[in-house]
Amino acid sequence: MLSDLLDEGLVQLGVEATDWEDAVRKSAAPLVELGMATAGYVDDIVRGVRELGPYVVVAPHVALPHARPESGALRAAIGVVTLASPVPFGSEENDPVRFLFPLAATDSDGHLGALQALVELLRAPAFLGRLERAASAAEVVEIIREMEGAPE
């Protein structure tokens, strides 16, 4: 479950970002600050987007910044970031991005499990609206826990 990887310290609301790279770096900063990923891991995310295009944009207005586990993921974790103003990533179908879920997965199974859990939440029409209206990190964590536990 996504809530198992989430900590209030990884939630940032109303972040100001000048472009996609700034958004990625700011979204992933708590992963580094809390010892869940290295600075090199964040550099690898940026390098990957530059080289491969906006592969981290996984749904309309949603990015899942991540890199390969061996790039410096130290502990499985996911953050939740809302941007004050959306930024384009170069994804024709899904730009601009307003929500980022920076992910550190220590193995590929963890990455797939977190992605699957996120996809389930994104299928709920109310999810992103609730995140956008959240007033605190604690509220974001509660929304995710509640929606993960809700029957379909």
Image: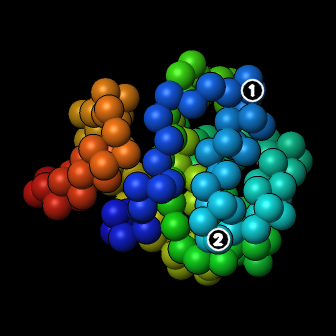
In the rendered image, is residue 98 in sight?
no
Q: How far is disc 2 from disc 1 in space, using C-alphas?
A: 25 Å
**Rendering quarter of residue 5:** bottom left
The residue where tag 1 is placed is 19
Against 140, residue 7 (above or below) is below
Q: Residue 29: horizontal and vertical position, in percent? A: 67, 52
Q: Residue 139: horizontal and vertical position, in percent? A: 27, 44
The residue where tag 2 is placed is 35
Mark positioned earlier in the residue sequence (2 or 1): 1
Q: Amino acid at mark 2?
A: Gly
**Rendering quarter of residue 95:** top right
Q: Residue 74: horizontal and vertical position, in percent? A: 66, 77
Q: Residue 33: horizontal and vertical position, in percent? A: 66, 61
Mark 2 or mark 1, whichever is nearer to me: 2
Q: Quadrant of the N terminus?
A: bottom left
Toward the left, the furthest residue is 151
Indicate left or right for 152 with 140 as reference: left
**Rendering quarter of residue 8:** bottom left
